[in-house]
Structure formats: C-alpha cells, structure tokens
Amino acid sequence: MKISQHIRKFLEYCEITQNRSKKTLENYNHYLKRFEEFLSEDIDPKDLTLKKIQNYRLFLNRFIDDRGGQLGIKTQNYHIIAVRAFLKYLVKNDVRSLAPEKIELSKIPERTVEVLSREELDRLFKAIDKTKKTGYRDAAILETLYSTGLRVSELTSLNRDQIDLKRREFMVRGKGKKPRIIFLSKKAANAITTYLKDRNDNLNPLFTNNGQGTKCDDILDEERRRLSTVSIENIVRKYALKAGIIKKVTPHTLRHSFATELLVNGADIRSVQEMLGHSSITTTQIYTHLSNKKLREIHEKYHK
C-alpha cells in the first residue's frame, strides 16, 4: 500500500476512531495533502527518510502563496505535527516507516499575549449603548466573554437551555470535545437575564442576529439566526474602537484578560488551566509572565 492510501486510512481513523473535530480533520487533510504534493511520487512508507523530511521543511520555509505571503514558523510546525501524527498511526499499525520521534519541531519565539487593563475594560463596557436595539445583547456577550474566558467558538455554540442562570454555571465542550464546567459572574448572569427578557422569540441559540421575523419552522432556520464567530469578533472590535482602545482587541483578548485577572488575584495555575480548558499546563503558563506585573507593584510599594 502506497503512502497516499495510508494517509486516507489515517484520516478515516481520526474521524471514526478518534472522533476528531471537523476543524482538526480539515487541517490534517490540508497539511497532509501538501505533504503528498511535495513528495511528487506515491512512495512506499518505508522509503520515507529523514532527508526527505528535512527537504520538506526547507520547502515549507521557502513556500510563497498566491498573495506573496510566507508560512510562519508556527504554521510550519502544524504541518510537521500532522506528519508526525500520521507516522505514529503507521507505527501503531505495524507499517514500516520513519520513526516519528526523529522529527523535531522548530523552536518558536516565546509567545506573548495582549490583555486589557481594568481601566480599559471599564471603558469597553461603558461604550455599549443599551438604548439601542442590540445594546442588551452586546452587553451580555462582552460580560460573558470576560466572566468565563470562553473561546469565541464556544460562545457562539451556546444555547438557552444549557445555561443555568440561578446556579450561574453551564457545561461546554471545547477543543477535543472535552467537557468542562463554566461559571458566570453575577454581572454576566444579570446581563444574560436582561437580554433574554428583552427578546421576543423562543429561539434556542443564546446569542442571535437581528434577522427579520421571529418565526422559525425548523432547526435549520434557528441556526441561521445564531450569531457567527465573525459577528462576535466584529462586535468586540466595534466597542474597542468606540472606547478608544488602541490595542487590537478580539474575543481572545478578553479570554487572556480573564486568565490574567485570576492569576494576579491569587488563583492557582492548575485551576486556571481547568477553567480555560487547556490540555497542557505549559499553555496556561504564558499568563504567569503577565501576572508578574504584580511583582513590580509590590516592589515599588515596599522597597524604599
């Protein structure tokens, strides 16, 4: 069996046995298709050498797309991660090929994230005009993002019937379809309650667009009314500009701000990891650098 056939089998394995998300499957398919195109010939897996992988990495590093753009180091690593996952699958199925542990990822610069200060957050929330038709909805969206640290995709998938506003908690399935409990602040729960009271429909999506009419005959119609991730991103960006915040503000900025606020106020990193839905503690550790700003305040206050 040639490598192209094994790749098809690997993708089926990811879909059926591992139950990977649609997005993961799309990414693996994209990265491995590029790998196949680079090989130019449908070789046997046992003929895959470290030299071929090195040449592929050079190809990725020098790749120029139709718009003249290059692949970042992080994107190049995603391509290599897909190849390594494929090779691990071959090992598991006793197919002779290159050992996946021989392939190392490129080192990338230490990641930094942007967060909003308390003063910027106050300005952001004050920028919402609740006298406007979308005011209550937008306030609920921003309060929920900051209160929970949800990813934008997790926020858009929320339904009314999964939110317990009395207990101020609900469950989501994040990356890898892993379930986790989410807690709402009183402000966020009140904002959602006010927004839902202002709604004049019984649609299940928690956050909806302003589509004409309220009658929906089926689930498909309901889903057309659900706010998209792009719409949420535009809403956050709109209020950041209105508030005069120079930084690039996205829903993920509010997620970063949520995590940093917890750490600065004494939360342990393991709890923050669980609340964010990170599979690895190393992902959460990026926020410890930001929370170290508290050390400067302590130094200035007590060192004379």
Image (tube, grey):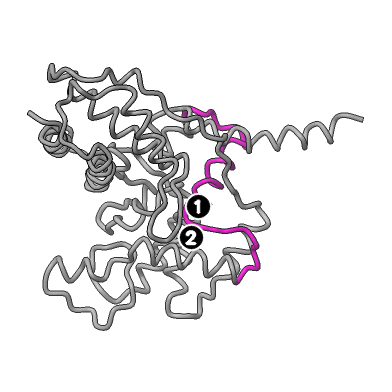
Task: Examine the rendered structure and indicate whether residue 37 appears above or below residue 13.
Answer: below
Please provide the residue range marked out in magenta: 242-270
**Cβ atoms at labels 2 and 1 below 8 Å apart:** yes
The residue depicted at 64 percent of the width and 63 percent of the height is: 245
Q: Position of residue 86 (x, y in %)?
A: 23, 29
Residue 242, given in percent of the width and then of the height, sits at: 60, 72
Image quarter of the N terminus? top left
* Residue 227, placed above or below residue 76: below
Left or right of residue 219: residue 120 = right
Near mark 1 (Cα within 10 A), the count class, few <14, some 14-19 or many ≥20, is: many
* Numbered-mark total: 2
Image-quadrant location for residue 112: top right
Q: Residue furthest bottom?
A: 212
Rendering quarter of residue 81: top left
Q: Amino acid at mark 2?
A: Leu
Most foreground residue, 142 or 281: 281
Instruction: Reply yes or no: does residue 69 show up in magenta.
Output: no
Q: Which residue is mark 1?
A: 146
Disc 2 designates what residue? 142
Q: Residue furthest front?
A: 41
In the image: residue 159, left or right of residue 11: right
Residue sitting at x 52%, y 65%: 237
Q: Nearer the viewer, residue 124 or 60?
A: 60
Query: Which residue shows up at 47% across the image and 73% down it?
Result: 135
